[in-house]
């Protein structure tokens, strides 16, 4: 008896047609022979759709942009804006570079750790918050600063402002808002 296995001619697509449309819009910004220039945008689009960047998504992006998968992986691991593992609903990234540290970012980070009961690189048990340490956000004069989900910058964070931010985000999590 002979068993034949069918191998799919085309790999499984993990990105939606809408994601590919967004990547195509980014590709249009560059000369046709410079498709790899859209790699950061493509990774961002994949992350927004899937919540994180997986090796499978890196490979799919590499294939679409005509790049080696390792080249895409090098980009996704170089920048801390790409989530390579599951994150909480709200990723809080605290800048701890020297200029911010001189303006109390380390104290703000310690306060956040205490209030959330987690350290850097950890997620609260309820899955609401992940706390990350970040590099320069270009807002030294606003320190201490926290980026929420890589989109919203919160500045001049005193303990009271941190408490207000955490309350606001918890309320959003309870209401199902992003």
Image (spheres, helix red, strand yellow):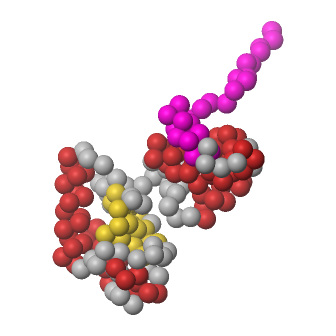
Closer to the camera in the image, 53 or 42: 42
Residue at the outermost bottom position: 102
User: What range of the chain is rendered magenta?
Assistant: 1-27
Q: Quadrant of residue 9?
A: top right
Image position of 46 (left or right of 161): right
Q: Measured from the top left, where is residue 98 in percent x and y?
A: 46, 87
Residue at the outermost right position: 2
Q: Residue at x 69, y 44 (%)?
A: 65
Image position of 84 (left or right of 7): left
Q: Residue at x 61, y 65 (%)?
A: 78
Seen in the picture, residue 162 relative to 26 is either above or below; the reply is below
Q: Number of labelled discs? A: 0
Q: Quadrant of residue 123?
A: bottom left
Q: Quadrant of residue 132?
A: bottom left
Q: Measured from the top left, where is residue 60 in percent x and y?
A: 64, 40
Q: Residue at x 61, y 48 (%)?
A: 29
Q: Quadrant of the N terminus?
A: top right
Q: Measured from the top left, where is residue 53 in percent x and y?
A: 54, 50
The answer to whether residue 163 is visible is yes
The answer to whether residue 57 is visible is no
Seen in the picture, residue 79 relative to 103 is either above or below; the reply is above
Seen in the picture, residue 36 relative to 167 is either above or below; the reply is above
Residue 11 on the magenta span: yes
Image position of 92 (left or right of 114): right
Q: Residue at x 56, y 42 (%)?
A: 25
Seen in the picture, residue 161 relative to 62 is either above or below; the reply is below
Closer to the camera in the image, 106 or 27: 27
């Amino acid at each position: 008896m002979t068993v034949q296995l069918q191998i799919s001619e085309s790999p499984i697509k993990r990105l939606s047609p809408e994601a590919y449309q967004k990547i195509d819009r980014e590709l249009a910004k560059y000369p046709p022979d410079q498709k790899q220039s859209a790699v950061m945008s493509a990774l961002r689009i994949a992350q927004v759709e899937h919540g994180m960047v997986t090796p499978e998504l890196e490979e799919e992006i590499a294939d679409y942009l005509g790049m080696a998968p390792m080249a895409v992986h090098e980009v996704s691991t170089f920048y801390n804006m790409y989530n390579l593992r599951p994150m909480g609903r709200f990723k809080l990234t605290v800048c701890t570079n020297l200029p911010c540290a001189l303006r109390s970012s380390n104290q703000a980070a310690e306060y956040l750790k205490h209030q959330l009961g987690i350290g850097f690189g950890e997620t609260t048990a309820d899955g609401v918050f992940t706390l990350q340490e970040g590099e320069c956000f270009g807002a030294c004069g606003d320190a201490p600063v926290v980026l929420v989900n890589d989109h919203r910058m919160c500045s001049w964070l005193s303990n009271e402002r941190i408490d207000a931010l955490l309350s606001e985000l918890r309320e959003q999590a309870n209401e199902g808002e992003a």
